[in-house]
Amino acid sequence: MRRTRILTTVLALAAGLLAGSSPAIGAEQADRNDKSVSVAADTYTWKNARIDGGGFVPGIVFNRKERNLAYARTDIGGAYRWVESSKTWTPLLDSVGWDNWGHTGVVSLASDSVDPNKVYVAAGTYTNSWDPGNGAILRSSDRGASWQKTNLPFKLGGNMPGRGMGERLVVDPNKNSVLYLGAPSGKGLWRSTDSGVTWSQVANFPNVGNYVADPSDTSGYSSDNQGIVWVTFDESTGTSGNATRTLYVGVADKDNAVYRSTDAGATWSRVAGQPTGYLAHKGVLDASNGYLYLSYSDKGGPYDGGKGQLWRYATATGAWTNISPVAEADTYYGFSGLTVDRQRPGTVMATAYSSWWPDTQIFRSTDSGATWTKAWDYTSYPNRANRYTMDVSSSPWLTWGANPSPPEQTPKLGWMTEALEIDPFDSDRMMYGTGATIYGTENLGNWDSGSQFTIKPMVRGLEETAVNDLASPPSGAPLLSALGDIGGFRHTDLTKVPSMMFTQPNFTTTTSLDYAESNPNTVVRVGNLDSGPHIAFSTDNGANWFAGTDPSGVSGGGTVAAASDGSRFVWSPAGTGVRYTTGFGTSWSVSSGIPADAIVESDRVDPKTFYGFKSGKFYVSTDGGATFTASNATGLPSGDSVRFKALPGGKGDVWLAGGATDGAYGLWHSTDSGATWTKLSGVEQADTIGFGKAAAGASYQTLYTSAKIGGVRGIFRSTDKGASWTRINDDAHQWGWTGAAITGDPRVYGRVYVSTNGRGVIYGDSSDTGGGGGGTDPDPEPAGPCAVTYTITNQWSGGFQADVKLANTGTSAWTGWSLGWTFPNGQSIAQLWNADHTQSGSAVTARNIGWNGKVAAGSSVSFGFTGSWSGTNAKPTAFRLGDQSCSVT
């Protein structure tokens, strides 16, 4: 489920976790552009909104010297180290900054078996033009707590085809100052003799590879030469402190896949007698019995593979043996995942990595490949007998909410299973990577005894999703997310894994979502799906969904906007022009005056006002999206790398961020629905804009942006309408590219949700208790008389919806309000929007949420809720604003 990751980063290019000490790249990296700008005094604690996994893990590496030391690499989300005491993963590359975002892609990782404190990363995301920077070798002598960097003269492809092969980066197990790196794109084999500080090409290595996945791909993504794909040492041919004599190299060449040196890399030759017609994905050597095992596929992976074989090479005699567990004619997949049990020589395991249907397969042999057993077998088709049980209670969304017909099962054993490792110190522990998680077992020995072993997610702390959009409604769930590959989630508790992603339908990627500002129970999302609708609606704050109907020609999600009251929607899908609808999208009408593929948003106060942006032009509709008119404003970014949002509670108050370095770039503000704009002079670049709860005493909501201010790239906050800014992240917390979305929390001052392209949803909390008390304010003192209108807008068996209008009928403005009442029949509030609330028995208190705390004399504020009732549903007859009674109308 990784195809959409490519598209996410292409969008990124168009745009130009834990608390405490986090790994930081050393001074060599120079991610900071200007060290003279000080980090803000306000200290933030950064965490992930827990999803646990979500993306492809192509590599798992155990250290061969130290028990429980293991690493995982991801294709776009950095590298992680295993923490045995908590059974969690710690992120190691959060310090990669905006300018070097490509270094969040990890094509290979090496853990030093001589000095376990040392670890190396080969970083780079794409070898084509999508990644403007070259690759790098990152080296650490403190297990990834800090890094130094050596830039390479070529690109690396952590998210390129063939990324599941490997490992391409290795440390000599006898002389750990020697490292090898297999390069893509015809760049050959490289070697370092000074622990990764400097590198030079092995000039006499005879083959740079020739395999490309798709020669016709003009983008350079699938047409790149996959190059040198793995290096393996025979540690038995060296002694401590001396370079290992014999090493094997895998090359992406179906006719010449394996080479060997027996003189520590001085000379090389093609290994005689080797199989042809396949790519060697892995080469794993068991020095105890002198066998090199190789997994072959006819394709480079990670998605494809039609045929495959497993082979064993006897290093002493040169004999090759086909040890494939099934006949080639019966394979419809390639072999890739490959591991040996270091405690039990002769035990080897492999995966059928591209068996998407009905499931992946894992094979196990205890006699060096002479005979095999499978993780599952057919009894009588389509029924299966599994050697394992699966427990996904810690990540229940891994079932995808599916109910497949046999022989498919849910959850699946996996797909894209190219990483497979038996713990070298514990024969009972195995981990393997999939397209969505890391699975593992700690009772693998049950396989051989005939009883079932248990597979569970072993992924907590590893967060690998690409985030396209974020929303934090004023009531209901604090966070809704639009994600690549796994759709998105409704987080009711940021510290817990949601039970399920958005379903009915399951988008492969959600591209945009929105909620109705005055009715947050109404939510809309759009996304990509191979077949089926591209839009879905919810009337319960995203807990449950139903599909809308696509207008003709839709090919992708695009962007979507909900009217402030949820009465209508405007949708700009891929493949056709902008459309609008009343109700829930059973039919759509063409919006005139606005170009196709425009970005659309809604005014957060006026339900008939919508906005759009395309190619430097801002568009406004005041008739619910039927017609748009282009603003006469000039000077906005000329491209489409723009994010803009309208301020909750402020009609016509719009902020726009975006641009590119070769043109207009920054942050703009309009208070007249885009007719005129003011560019904020202090913001050099900005790519996102979001709003959160106002600081204590502030009259305007808090602004958040991913921007460059004062010469420094970072996440910034303003509590004074953009007059001044505070950088709230630091060099250890940068997360590469953060240009897709940002939002504050309307209920918790200082809380901000940050999108990443591979590190999931990051959220930060401020230590500044004076800014807003962490989301709770003291009851404001009322100032003058008040009037309340309580209206039951809808009622059904056991439930109802009501609106409350609170009017300031005095002569002085309120800077905050707290309204209390008692339900006469014991009614209970289920969800309330546009206010915070507490309920004790029948007594209810509703408070402002920052942005709607200021109520001028003669003005009013409104909020609504849904609730339950039984017997009768009489209206409250008395309301109090603080200590004062309000008149009731």
Image: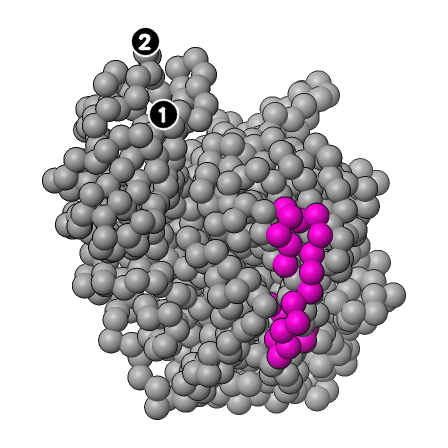
What stretch of residues is rendered in magenta?
A: 620-642
Residue at x 39%, y 65% (from the top left corner): 703
- 484 in the magenta segment: no
Residue to which mark 2 is pinned? 871
Q: Secondary structure at mark 2?
A: loop
Q: Would you say the residues marked 2 and 1 are in contact, meaning their CB atoms lie under 8 Å apart?
A: no
| Neighbours of disc 2 within 10 Å: few (<14), some (14-19), many (20+) | few
In the picture, measured across the screen, residue 887 lies left or right of residue 472, that is: left
Residue at x 63%, y 73% (from the top left corner): 633
244 w.r.t. 552: above or below: below
Which residue in the rendered view is the most extreme toward the right? Answer: 216
Q: Residue 236 at x, y = what percent?
A: 52, 69
Residue at x 64%, y 37% (from the top left corner): 582
Q: Residue 830 at x, y = what percent?
A: 35, 29
269 w.r.t. 468: above or below: below
Q: Residue 781 at x, y = what percent?
A: 15, 50
Residue to which mark 1 is pinned? 867
737 w.r.t. 453: above or below: below
Say which amino acid is labelled 2: Gly
In the picture, measured across the screen, residue 613 lies left or right of residue 850, that is: right
Most foreground residue, 882 or 104: 882
Most foreground residue, 483 or 328: 483
Say which amino acid is labelled 1: Gly
Label tally:
2
| Neighbours of disc 1 within 10 Å: few (<14), some (14-19), many (20+) | some
Overall secondary structure of the magenta stretch?
Answer: loop
Image quadrant where residue 285 sits: bottom right
Q: Secondary structure at mark 1?
A: strand
Most foreground residue, 116 or 479: 479
